[in-house]
Each structure stands twice: as structure tokens, then as C-alpha cells.
Amino acid sequence: MSSFLLFCAQDLTLTEEQAKAFYKEHAARPFYHSLVQFMCSGPIVALALRRKGAILGWRKLAGPTNSHRARAIAPNSLRATFGKLLYYFHEKSMIYY
């Protein structure tokens, strides 16, 4: 697996409007409101990463969304290693190139 090129990184805190726009595909889902609130609750690090197959590669590196499941089936993933809550490590806060 090739490495990622870190193209850009920025610390920021999403506004509610930004989070709603970013997650609009989930607006009808029961977790939408709590997801928006969580993503606005504090700072995130937005990354622009570059490599061939970056989206799939990042998702594999991040691991399953649920950190308990990640520990069971992807023990070397970022969520298995660092996740303490369901969305503690949230790959959707990333920008892919």
C-alpha cells in the first residue's frame, strides 16, 4: 500500500450549517441530528490527502465506524487504536483528492 501525501491540513470547528451541508445525504437517517451536533461540538482536523485510491485507502486505514467492531475485525486501524466512542475518530471529516 502506498503512503498518503498530505496536501493540506487545517484545524477548524464546523458550524451547524456546514455540518448539515456536509452530511445532507444522511438527513433522513435517525442519527443525523446527533451526528451534526457531534461534528460541531469541537475542533476537527480537516486533511486533504493524495494518492491513488485515496478514498478507499483512507477508509481501510480508518477502519469500521464503530470502534468496538474495529477492534474485532480491523485491529490495526485508526479507530481500533484510538477510538473510544462510536465516532471519536471520524473519517468523514476528511477531504480527499
Image (tube, helix red, strand yellow):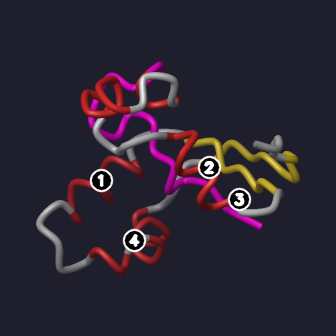
Residue 94 lies in the magenta-colored region:
yes
Relative vertical location of residue 33 with respect to residue 85 in this rendering, above or below: below
Instruction: Kindly report the distance in space between the C-alpha atoms of the residues bearing marks 3 and 2.
Output: 6 Å
Q: Earlier in the sequence, mark 3 or mark 4?
A: 4
> Which residue has dot 3 on it?
54
Q: Which quadrant holds residue 3?
A: top right
Instruction: Kindly report the distance in space between the C-alpha atoms of the residues bearing marks 1 and 3.
Output: 27 Å
Q: Could you tell me the amino acid type at mark 4?
A: Tyr
Relative vertical location of residue 23 with respect to residue 11 in this rendering, above or below: below
Which residue is depicted at the point 53% across and 51% down? 59
Under circle 2, the secondary element is helix
Q: Position of residue 44 (x, y in %)?
A: 56, 42
Q: Which quadrant holds residue 75?
A: top left
Instruction: Kindly report the distance in space between the C-alpha atoms of the residues bearing marks 4 and 1.
Output: 11 Å
Under circle 1, the secondary element is helix
Left or right: where 20 falls relative to 22: left
